[in-house]
Amino acid sequence: MSQIAAPADRRFRRSHVKPSRSRRNRRAFVTPLVTSLFLLVVVLVVLARGRTVMAQLGVLQVDRVVVHGNQRLSKGEVLAVLNGLRGESLFWTDLDAWRLRLMSSPWVRDAALRRSLPSTVDVMISERQPIGLSRLHDDL
């Protein structure tokens, strides 16, 4: 027996078998979920790394402390109370803790600390007013 070679008919198509509906629905649900989880993990890793990098940048560290509102308390005394603030990260330092430390001074009635970019902390002080009575000989 001899075989006869015939040219392929271009109109001939194989029948395509479609996958079942349940498999397609599962894939349509799982693929976006896995993609979203992957992107969430990537964003969290980038944010964690970014926070570390920002904390270590010299530009974002406290370089200057500017004092306003002091009359009886000298600038040097205020800076002595805030010793250690210079060199900390401008964004991650706890200014409330530094405020409480400044409030421990007997002259300070109230204080406010504010971040000022690129590397400054502004300190606004409200001082107590001295009130005193004295007796000189028989006079009050």
Image (tube, helix red, strand yellow):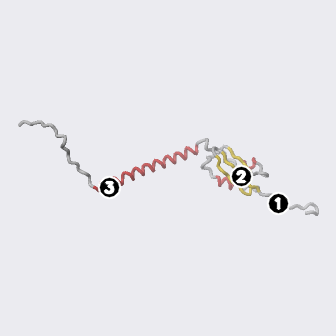
Which quadrant is home to the N terminus? top left
Residue at which label 1 appears = 131
Question: Mark 1 or mark 3, which is nearer the start of the sequence?
Answer: 3
Left or right: residue 31 compared with residue 17: right
- Residue 9 location, x and y as percent? 17, 40
- Tell me which numbered mark, 3 or 2, is placed earlier along the sequence: 3
Helix, strand or loop at mark 3:
helix
Q: Amino acid at mark 3?
A: Asn
Residue at numbered disc 2 = 124
Across the whole image, how many numbered discs are drawn on residues?
3
- In the rendered structure, which disc, 1 or 2, sits on the residue that comes first in sequence? 2
Mark on residue 25?
Answer: 3
Q: CA distance from mark 3 to mark 2?
A: 62 Å
- The residue most toward the left is 1
Residue under the point 23% across and 48% down: 16
Q: Say which of marks 1 and 2 sits in front.
A: 2
